[in-house]
Amino acid sequence: MIYAPRLPRIGTFDAWRDAARALASNDVPPDQIDWAMQDSDAGLFGASGAPLPSARDMTVPKAFIPLARQVCASRTAGAHDLLYRVLLRSRGAPRLLSNRADPQVQRLEEIGKNIRRDMHKMKAFVRFREVTEQGANRRSFLSWFEPDHRIEELIGGFFTRRFADMDWAIVTPEVTMRFAAGDLSVKAVQSARLDLSDETEALWKTYYANIFNPARLKIKAMQSEMPKKYWKNLPEAELIPELIANAEAQVRVMQEQAQSQPPPRAAKVLDRLPLREMPCALASCARCPLGAKATQAVAGEGPRDAPLMIVGEQPGDYEDLAGRPFVGPAGQLFDTLALEAGLDRRAAYVTNAVKHFKFTPRGKRRIHQSPHRSEVEACRIWLAEEIEQIRPALIVAMGATAAQALTGSGTDVLKRAGRVEEGTDGLPVLVTVHPSAILRASNGSALRARLIGDLKQAVEMCDRIAALPPDR
Ligand code: URA
C-alpha cells in the first residue's frame, strides 16, 4: 500500500507534521510513502494514495521540531522523506539528532543550514518601495523577492516585528505576505516579477554607478558575497555587468587622473564600511525615516576577527559628518577610558545600535535626539549582520539604546551595569554606561569608574576566552 501525502504551499510544516504523526505512530515504513507538494508533478503516484491511518500518541525529541520546520521549507529533493526517516529512527534513539556523525542527521543539518542562509539573505536584501496612498494614515511599502526555498512562512514573523508600525507587502513568485493594520496574511499566489522601478531607483543606480570602484573589482569575491542569484532583487544589479565590462578601461582613466582628482566622498565612505553585503544596502537604508535627514549611514569598524564588540547608541554630529563611529567628544572620552582599562580601541569592533544620526535643528546646530524604540528595531538588522559576521566572544552594550538593541531591554542600565546577560543573538552582553552620560553628569567620576571597571572586565573576559582551547 502506498500513502501519498500532498503538502500545501501554505501550512506545509503543519501538514507534514500531521501526516508524519499518523504514519509514524502506525509504523508505516518510509518506502511506502510518496511525499510531494500539492500542485506539483513531483509525486510518483499523483494524489491517489491510500487514506492516512488515524494518528496515535507519540512523542518526538524537542530539538526535532524547529529543525523539521526549516527542512519542510526546503526545495531539496527528498527533504520530506529524509525528515520522516529521521523521525522514525529518533523514536528509539532520543539522542539521534545530537549525533553529528550520523549521515542522515548531517544531511538534515545541511538542509536546515541552507534554509537559514536563505532567510538571512532575504532579511538583508529585501528592498521596500513606498507606495503610500494620499491621505492614508499608515505608510505602505511594497517589495519583491525571489527566495531559493519556501521560506516565506518562516520569515513572516521577522518582518512583522521589524516593521510593525507600517503596512507592507512582500511578494514572491509563489506567495504574497501582506501586513496591514497589525495583521499578517500569507497566501499562496503566483506572481510574475514586480517592476518596482521609479525615480528613486534611478537615483540609487546613479549613486551606485558613481561609487563603484573598478580598481577594487574582484568578481569572484563579489559573487560569493552577493551571489548572482540575488542580483535580481536589487535595483543596482542591472548595472553590474556593464560596470564590470568597463572596469579595466576605467581603471586606466583613474590612474591617469589620480594626481588631479580626489576620490569622491561617497567612495571613501563605502571603502571604509568594512563588512560584506552591508555597504550597498546600508547606504540606501530607508527602514526608518532617520536616513532621510542624516548625512550618511555610519557602519561599525574594527578587525573582522575582533573578540570584543562595543556598541553605542547612534552616530553623533561629528560621526555623521565623518562617517565613522565614536570620533566626536564621546568617542574621545571612550578612547581615553578604554586605554585606562587596558583596551586598545583598534582591537575591538566599535559600532552603534542605530546607524543614522537623529537630531533636531536649532539654529545652525543639530541637537542630538534619542532614537525611538521603533527606529532601534528597524535598524536591528544591521547590528545583527555585524554580529553575524564578526561573531565576537563578548559584546559590550554602552547605554540604554545598545542594551535595548542587544538584550531586548533598555531599562535600569545603572543597576545592570557590570552584569553579563545573554543577548538576543545568543552571545554574552556586558551592560555598562555610555560615555555621553559621563559628559552630561555634573559629577561624572562614579560613572567614569564604572565604565573603566566594566571595560576592564570585558578585556579580562576576552583574554580568558582566547586562552581556552579552540573546541571549547
Ligand atoms: N555616541 C554614540 O553612541 N556613538 C557614536 O558613534 C558617537 C556618540
Image (spheres, rainbow, N blue to C red):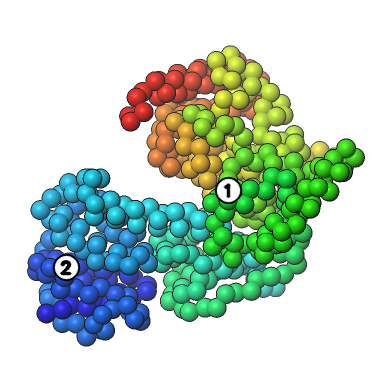
Going by the image, does 35 lie left or right of 320? left
Q: Quadrant of the C terminus?
A: top left
Q: Nearer the viewer, residue 159 or 193?
A: 193
Element type where label 1 sits in the image: helix
Going by the image, does 345 lie left or right of 206? left
Question: Disc number at residue 30?
Answer: 2
First in residue order: circle 1 vs circle 2: 2
Residue at 73% of width from left, 49% of height from top?
214
Q: Position of residue 212 (x, y in %)?
A: 72, 51
Disc 1 crowd rating (10 Å Cα; few below 14, some 14-19, many 20+) is few
Q: Is residue 460 visible?
A: yes
Three-letter amino acid code of the residue under disc 1: Ala
Residue at 22% of width from left, 69% of height from top?
18
Three-letter amino acid code of the residue under disc 2: Pro
Q: Position of residue 412 (x, y in %)?
A: 48, 32
Q: Is residue 139 visible?
A: no
Q: Position of residue 210 (x, y in %)?
A: 77, 53
Q: Nearer the viewer, residue 295 or 148?
A: 148
Q: Residue 246, located in which quarter of the rendered image? A: bottom right
Going by the image, does 389 lie left or right of 52? right
Disc 2 crowd rating (10 Å Cα; few below 14, some 14-19, many 20+) is some
Residue at 44% of width from left, 20% of height from top?
463
The residue labelled by disc 1 is 221
Query: Is residue 198 placed above or below 333 in the rendered structure?
Result: below
Query: Is residue 138 placed above or below 359 in the rendered structure?
Result: below
Residue at 45% of width from left, 39% of height from top?
407
